Amino acid sequence: MAGIVVVTLLTAILMIVDLAIGGRPDPAPLRAASTLLDGPWRFHTGDDPQWAAAGTDDSAWETIDMTAPPGSHDGDVGLPDYVGGWMAHGHPDHHGYAWYRRTVTVPAGSASWDILGPTLVEDGYELYWNGQLLGSSGRLGPDPRLVGTRPLKFALPAGVAGTRGVLAVRTYMLPGSGASADGGGMHTPPILSPRPASDALHRAQWQRTIAGYILDAVEPAAMLALVGLALVYGARSSRKGFLVFACIALVLTAARRLNNAIVAWTDLQDLVTYTWLASVMWVPTMTAWVLAWNRWCLPAWRSVDALAVALGVAGIVGALAHLPVWTSVSRLGSLALFVVIVARIVRGGPMRVLALVTLVSVLTTLFGPELLDTIGVPGIWFPFNIGVARTQYIYAISIPLLAFLIVRTLLPRNARQ
C-alpha cells in the first residue's frame, strides 16, 4: 500500500512540473526577435496549385484577420494566439481545400530565416514561399493523408534576408470533421524567426505540445502497470473473474488514451483511423467494465452479462452505422446495469466503501456526458495554461484506487483458492 502511495505522489509531482514548464509563455526575447504573421490574410476556398505562385492575383480574394484577442488560446491544449477558422468567417458548411496568402518582409542581415508553421490547423496544410513548397503537415493531393498538427519548422531559401515574398498556405479539412462553429483551416498564424531564435522557439512549442498530452502517455503506462500487478498476483486474488475483465478494460482504456498522444506527437496514425477508433473503442471498454464489476459480488449474474454483451453489440452497430439512437441505448442501458451492480455492492459486497468509490470513479470516466455535463463540470481545465481533461483528473484518482482494490483482494499464501 505504501508503495502505491509513494509512486502516485512522485508521478503527480513530475506531471505538475511538466505542465508548469510547458505552460510558460514563449520567452519574450525569442518573440521579440521573431514576427508573428497575424493580421490580414487573403483567403479563398477551393483548390488550384497556381495559387502558390507569387504572381497570383489575389486582390479579389476575401480577407481573414488572423489577429488573436489578448489571452486567446485553443480549448484543448491551450495553444496561444488562437483565432476562429473559416467556419466563423462566413463558410460554416465548407469542407475540403482553402488557401491563405500574404506578403512577408524578411528583415535584412546575415541571419538565416525559418517559418514556424501554424501549430493548429484543421486538418492539414502545405506551406509555400514564392511558389516553392517548403513542407507540409500530412500529405495533400488526390488521396490526402491527414495527421495531427504539431510544431513544424521550415527553412526559407538562402538569400531571402532583406527581400519580400509571398507566403501561401494550402489547407485541407476532412469531410465530416470540425463540428464547432469556428472550425476550419488555420487557427494560429505562422511565425517568421531567425536562427537560432527559431530553434529555441520551436523547442518551446514542443514543450507545450508534450505537456498537453503527457498524461495521455503516463496514465496508460500506469494502467498497464496495473495489468502487470494483476497478472503477477492474480492467482492469490479472491476476485479472479473481476481481475480478468478489469485487465481487458484497462488495456482497452490505455490504448484509447494513448491514441491521443500518438496522434499529437507522431505521424504514425492518420486522423481518419484515429477518429474511427475513438468512435468505436469506447464500446468494448464499457462492456469489459460491466463484465468486470458484475463479478465483484459473487456469483456473477448471467442476465447482466447477456445484457452487457447485447448493449455492446448495439453500441458497435450504432458507431459504425452512425445511428445515434443505438449509441444512446447502448450507453444508457450500460449505465443502468452499473446502477444494478452498485445496488448489489451496497447490499453486501466485499470491501464495500473502497469498491463503491472505485466504481464511481470508473463510471465518471465512462459516462462523463451523462453524469458530469448535466451538473456543469467543465470538460477541460487549464492548470498552468495547459489543458487537462476532467477524465485525466479522474484517472489520476481511479488508477491508485484500482491498485488498492487489487491488493486488497489478495489472499494469504496459505489460503489460495
Image: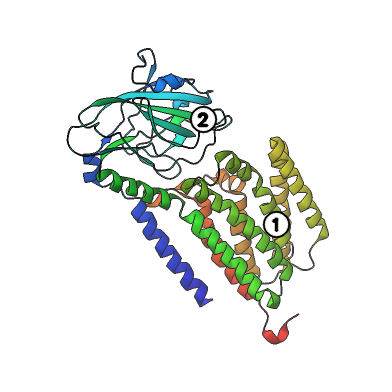
Answer above or below: position of 301 versus 408.
above
Depicted 229 relative to depicted 135: above or below: below
Residue 114 position (above or below residue 58)? below
The secondary element bearing badge 2 is classed as strand
Evaluate if marks 1 and 2 touch, with contact meaning CB atoms under 8 Å apart. Answer: no
Instruction: Give the distance between the C-alpha atoms of the residues marked 1 and 2, in whole angstroms.
Output: 35 Å
Point out the frontmost of discs 1 and 2. Answer: 2
Q: What is the three-letter code of the residue carrying label 2?
A: Met
Q: Residue at x 43, y 48 (%)?
A: 387
Q: Which mark is residue 288?
A: 1
Residue annotated with mark 2: 173
Task: Please state which of residues 379 and 267 is positioned toward the viewer in this rendering.
Answer: 267
Q: Residue 230, position in %: x, y?
A: 64, 70
Residue 133 appears left or right of 32:
right
Q: Residue at x 40, y 63 (%)?
A: 14
Protein image colouring? rainbow
Residue 72 in the image, given as x and y percentages of width and height: 36, 37
